[in-house]
Image: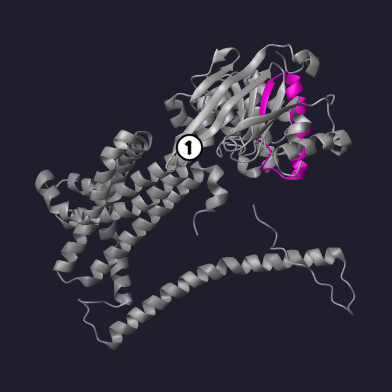
Amino acid sequence: MSLLVTEPDTAVSRSSSPVAIETRDLSQVFLTKQGPVHALERVDLTVRRGEFVSVVGPSGCGKSTLLRIVAGLERHTFGEVEVDGAPVSKPRTDVGIVFQRDALLDWRTALENVLLQVDMRRKRTRADVERARELLASVGLQGFEDALPGQLSGGMRQRVSICRALILEPDVLLMDEPMSALDALTREQLMVDLQEMVARNGMSVLFITHSIPEAVFLGDRVVVMGARPGRLIEEIVVPFERPRSLRLLADPEFNDMATRIRSLLGEIPA
Amino acid sequence: MTAVSEERPIAAVPGKVRPSREAVIAKLISDDRRRRRLAGPRSVGMIVLSIVGVLVVWWLVVVVFQIPRFVLPNPVEVLQQFVGSIPLLAEEAVPTLQEVLIGFAITVAVFVPVGVLIASSRVFEGFVNPLLVISQSTPMIAFAPLLITAFGYSIVPKVVMVVLIAFFPVVVNTVVGIKSVSQDVVDLGRSMGASNAKMLLKVRLPAALPSIFAGLRVAITLSVIGAVVGEYAGADAGLGRLIVVASGRLNTPLVFATVIALAIIGLVLYKLVELAEWASLPWHRDKRGRPGR
């Protein structure tokens, strides 16, 4: 798959495409001093290939746990989890992950941080370095390749960490509140950029957030979760055409949808 | 990176002609330069002043209470002795420096890896931690005579003493540094399929370096103490032995001159470690600032 090819599918054609991520009857129980806690309860979630699924929910609803289980970073208690048709039993090394905090290494430059993904697996080639440069340039970081993370702003650092997740062109991208540490303007710009990057690579994305506008703006589908126990409340198909512009944030239809999700989450009375 | 100045609003004074923006900015810059000029020499001046103050008090105490020379010589006598004994002190400094440097090198070579092991293995941690705690509540100095019995009048007991006294901060800081790596970074490594060895080399060790260097800075000064203690117990050369010999002959000015020599060695070695840290951790410089202050 090339970075330059834009996949022409739409939400409609995707609904019949093969499954990228699937959880069936997934439950997660943590043992605490107060006894067992149900972090996730019977979660059935499907992300089709090329689909962008946003998961929105209050803090403590287990949405981050869900992502960690899909990534194979955490064992689950009950149910089945499959990525690309194979059950997840150990950390998946073929998915891209972006965390809330950028988790950049302070002593590596922006370029070197992106290439960490390569260095951990094999010897890097000149093509890898070229690719890393291209990626950084594509998110507006040309000229900052040799900057240390300490010299970059929060938004720039998160862009670097996204490039690190993308350099090996994973089919599946997992993002855990990647924008919640950023200021509002940076976040909006990054939403637009992220949409473009995902479209370019044709990836399947599981996007965890607690921001409703983010979830709706980016998602083909929004999955709404409730807390204690963490469970799926509702799935909403987002019909807006892509590419979506920031103007959508002021669209009445967009706001209706956001309001509906808000009432599902109990933030405003239904 | 240096900020031009702390932000200070420029108040417009009523009734006066408003200065141009350029003039105001020029004034800000010149004020800042002046502050900076004053800041440097003033801090150096304060150091000199405090040292001179101590020397004056010392001198007054000796003169006023008529303290005999073999109990406490006055600072002028000590300085004369120091200058006059420079060849002797330099000669005796060589074996002491050898003990310090070999002991310090062994401490680093052995106890950084021990720290890494403790941080990476629960089992190892369980075995070693109690020993570490016990070792720190044991006065290592007490072993000095035993070391002489075991190893004779060679360099070995001194080096062992250096290691015994200096290893603890190295181990502890290595463990803290290795464990400072965030869970996110560890998870990221797992998702990249990184082996434990790669994780250690590319992530944990570099992340631990600032903390390890903090341990080395403490360890190098302790190393000097260890060498002197080792020589006290029995030696045929070195600054520690010189102190024993000089005080046995009631040559107190020479004792003080030797202490000064040891202080200089300690300070220089400390600065060298700091310099090594500054040179090897460019990404950490802003947080710790330039050495040499």
Q: Which residue type carries mark 1?
A: Pro
Q: Which range of residues does the magenta coloring cover?
A: A178-207
Q: Position of residue A164 (x, y in %)?
A: 63, 28
**Residue at 58% from the left image edge and 36% from the top image edge:** A104
For residue A83, above or below residue B107: above
Q: Is residue B97 left or right of residue A210?
A: left
Q: Which residue is mark 1?
A: B206
**Tag 1's secondary structure?**
helix
- Magenta-colored stretch includes residue A106: no
Q: Quadrant of residue B130?
A: top left
Q: Position of residue A148 (x, y in %)?
A: 61, 39
Question: In the rendered image, which quarter contains the C terminus of chain A?
Answer: top right
Q: Nearer the viewer, residue B16 or A1?
A: A1
**Residue at 16% from the left image edge and 46% from the top image edge:** B154
Number of on-image labels: 1
Tell me, yes or no, if residue B123 can be seen here: yes
- Magenta-colored stretch includes residue A189: yes
Chain letter of the residue carrying label 1: B
Q: Is residue A17 left or right of residue A248?
A: left
Q: Quadrant of residue A48?
A: top right
Q: Position of residue A178 (x, y in %)?
A: 66, 35
Q: Position of residue B280 (x, y in %)?
A: 49, 41
Question: In the rendered image, which quarter contains the N terminus of chain A?
Answer: top right
Q: Main secondary structure of the magenta part?
A: helix
Q: Quadrant of residue A47?
A: top right
